[in-house]
Amino acid sequence: MDVIAVDDPTDAQIRQWHSVLLAVHADDPADDPVPEPEQTAARLLGAEQGSRQRLWAALEDGEMTAVAALRLPGAPGADRPAEIDIQVRPDRRRHGLGSALLHHAAEGLRADRRSSVIAQVSAATPAVPFLESHGFECVLTLKGLLLHLSDVPPGRVKELIAAGPVGYDLVHWQGAVPDEYALALARAKHAMADMQAYEGVPWDADRVREMAEMVNKRGDALYTVAAVQGTTVAGFTEVVVSADDPYRAAQYDTAVVPEHRGRRLGIWVKAAMLDWLSRERPEVREIETDNAGDNVHMLAVNEELGYRRQRETREYQASASVLP
Ligand SMILES: CC(C)(COP(=O)(O)OP(=O)(O)OC[C@H]1O[C@@H](n2cnc3c(N)ncnc32)[C@H](O)[C@@H]1OP(=O)(O)O)[C@@H](O)C(=O)NCCC(=O)NCCS
């Protein structure tokens, strides 16, 4: 087996990479959409905005049987963890391919002067013993939830909107935040204390706009609903409808600023989002979301709206020094 760097992938390498992803998906579809060749090509040919990436592939008898992508957010040496994703063809597992790729990625990590790396994986899959055997530790457990819009009883959304607290208004926008709310939205994002502590990067108006721009560049659409008092954002929720799979939207951030909590603003903005999406994007049939396992309030809001629990995702982290 050889491991090669795929820093400038050729068309043939992109096709081979895609066939590894298809084989992995076929073995464990986990309710995820089948990867599309254009998606794979786009990911391999360009890193997300604000990030660089390194790619490696394992070849056996000239055939690509396993792949690894290391995402490096920010500049070299940035104080942010890199992200690793390794995929091994199901029929080639337990032969050390995953470990060999991890070894190359660890060297790439150190060459970029990163102190740690994270991986997001499904619980109850081989990824868990694999990562744990290499010194990774679980730092976050996320419960996957899915809402089938057809399961929401008729009238329920209107009822929740009508029951909204006095003294707040609902506003919504698509894409980048309007200037008058940009600073206030960044402040509200601070309310997501758990994530912020974890990512270690503070939100400001520019970063909020950058995130919207990134979604837009991918061809996806970002929808935001906020509960406001004047230009103060008390709470907000974001949903992204992707160009690849417009039937299943993804919940992004939802937060209520601490001094406005306990007034059912969370469920109010989420109900208003369902109402707006049903008019704006009637093709959306499902919304998926992840909640931190210990975020009992958000889990309760989502379950009241009709979300059902699905898979569990775990975030693993390892410091560069413990990796092979
Ligand atoms: C997780 C994955 C990458 C492991 O790849 P692999 O090539 O099979 O891993 P390795 O052969 O290098 O395994 C190294 C060690 O990990 C542990 N391990 C790996 N798979 C395991 C399993 N199914 N059960 C128990 N232990 C396992 C073992 O300790 C193994 O050493 P051993 O075979 O000597 O006992 C592969 O199963 C995969 O592609 N899964 C789907 C995609 C995924 O979840 N990727 C994780 C993202 S980082």
Image (cartoon, rainbow, N blue to C red):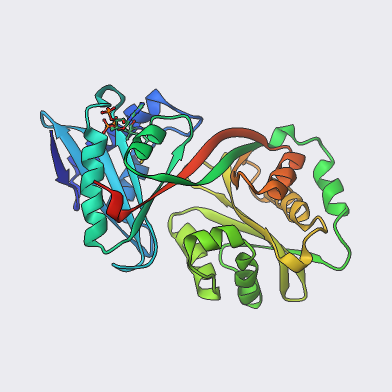
Can residue 216 be seen by looking at this rendering? no
> Is 303 left, or right, of 165 in this rendering?
left
Residue 81: % across, % down: 38, 58
Quarter of the image with the N terminus in it? top left
Above or below — where is 283 with respect to 236? above
Residue 222: % across, % down: 57, 57
> Is 261 left, or right, of 115 in this rendering?
right
Of residue 30 and residue 245, the one placed in the foreground of this image is 30
| Quadrant assignment, res 247 | top right
Residue under the image location 72 percent in, 76 percent down: 231
| Quadrant assignment, res 175 | bottom right
Residue under the image location 61 percent in, 76 percent down: 183
> Is 117 left, or right, of 283 in this rendering?
left
Residue 199: % across, % down: 48, 61
Residue under the image location 70 percent in, 46 percent down: 296
Above or below — where is 185 with respect to 254? below
Residue under the image location 21 percent in, 53 percent down: 107
| Quadrant assignment, res 284 | top right
Of residue 85 and residue 268, the one placed in the foreground of this image is 85
Above or below — where is 173 with respect to 322? below
Can residue 261 be seen by looking at this rendering? yes
> Is 185 left, or right, of 154 in this rendering?
left
Residue 24: % across, % down: 35, 29
